Image (spheres, helix red, strand yellow):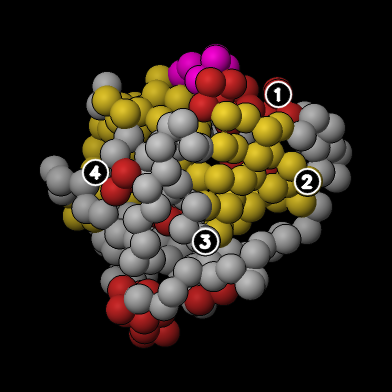
């Protein structure tokens, strides 16, 4: 279950994004084919904007821990040394943020979710995943989306360790969904047999967040 008693503070940005969901801001009503590089309503940026809930936890690699638990055969409790000793994978993928910017050709390195699943072995009744983060943020995914071929727990971007502002030491990257699903400052991964919507999903955002279908808000 998500930590209902440990919610991040309500920042000005949070209030604005809740209002955008109510108003349907940025919606174009269009859809795109995945082979088109940019989803509907998105604009290209060369920068990497930072959006968070007003907290930027400072977690060193020495203090960082990752717990993987719930409906799994092999719960995992890794420190940085154990995590970094796992198979390492590199992917290049695009970022599509729900606030309408996209950034192409991001080079990531980390542990693929496929290899994580091999290590923790989800039970047959595990169908959903909830990501818990050091700032109190949560977001939910189907097991199928979490297990996407190019999804990974990233610790590096463009050949350098992920910075604190971008979610270091480790963040999830799920390129085929809007980037709020790619949780920063990853702390725990919980496997569940029932869905448990996370921070933005209970505040008006779409439960899945597929950019090509423009699934920005829960009313879409």
Q: Which residue is mark 3?
A: 136
SS assignment for the magenta stretch, majority: loop
For mark 2, does the 10 Å Cα neighbourhood hold few (<14), some (14 to 19), or many (20 or more) residues?
some
Q: Residue 119 at what x, y percent from top left?
A: 71, 24
Mark sitting on residue 103: 4
Q: Nearer the viewer, mark 4 or mark 2?
A: 2
Q: Which residue is mark 1?
A: 119
Quick one: label 1 or label 4, which is nearer the N terminus?
Answer: 4
Answer whether labels 2 and 3 touch (C-beta < 8 Å).
Answer: no
> Which of 10/23 is in front?
10
Q: Nearer the viewer, mark 1 or mark 4?
A: 1
Q: Which residue is mark 2?
A: 70
For mark 1, does the 10 Å Cα neighbourhood hold few (<14), some (14 to 19), or many (20 or more) residues?
some
Residue 110 is a magenta residue: no
Q: Residue 6 at what x, y percent from top left?
A: 58, 68
> Which of 37/102 is in front?
102
Q: Which residues are magenta?
A: 84-89
> Which of 116/132 is in front?
132
Quick one: label 1 or label 3, which is nearer the N terminus?
Answer: 1
Q: Is residue 12 left or right of residue 136?
A: left
Q: Is residue 13 left or right of residue 141?
A: left
Q: Quadrant of residue 3?
A: bottom right
For the N terminus, give its image quadrant. Answer: bottom right
Q: CA distance from mark 1 to mark 3?
A: 25 Å
């Amino acid at each position: 279950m998500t930590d209902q008693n440990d919610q991040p503070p309500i920042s000005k940005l949070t209030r604005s994004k809740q209002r955008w969901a109510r108003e349907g801001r940025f919606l174009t009503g269009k859809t795109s084919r995945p082979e088109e590089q940019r989803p509907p309503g998105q604009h290209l940026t060369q920068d990497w904007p930072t959006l968070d809930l007003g907290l930027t936890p400072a977690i060193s690699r020495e203090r960082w821990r990752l717990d993987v638990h719930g409906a799994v055969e092999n719960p995992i409790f890794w420190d940085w040394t154990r995590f970094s000793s796992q198979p390492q994978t590199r992917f290049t993928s695009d970022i599509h943020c729900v606030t309408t910017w996209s950034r192409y050709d991001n080079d990531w390195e980390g542990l693929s979710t496929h290899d994580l699943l091999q290590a923790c072995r989800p039970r047959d009744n595990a169908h959903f995943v909830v990501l818990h983060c050091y700032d109190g943020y949560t977001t939910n995914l189907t097991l199928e989306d979490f297990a996407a071929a190019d999804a990974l727990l990233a610790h590096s971007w463009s050949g350098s360790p992920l910075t604190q502002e971008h979610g270091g030491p480790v963040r999830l990257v799920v390129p085929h969904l809007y980037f709020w699903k790619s949780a920063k400052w990853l702390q725990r991964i919980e496997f569940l047999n029932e869905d448990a919507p996370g921070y933005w999903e209970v505040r008006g955002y779409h439960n899945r967040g597929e950019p090509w279908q423009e699934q920005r808000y829960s009313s879409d």
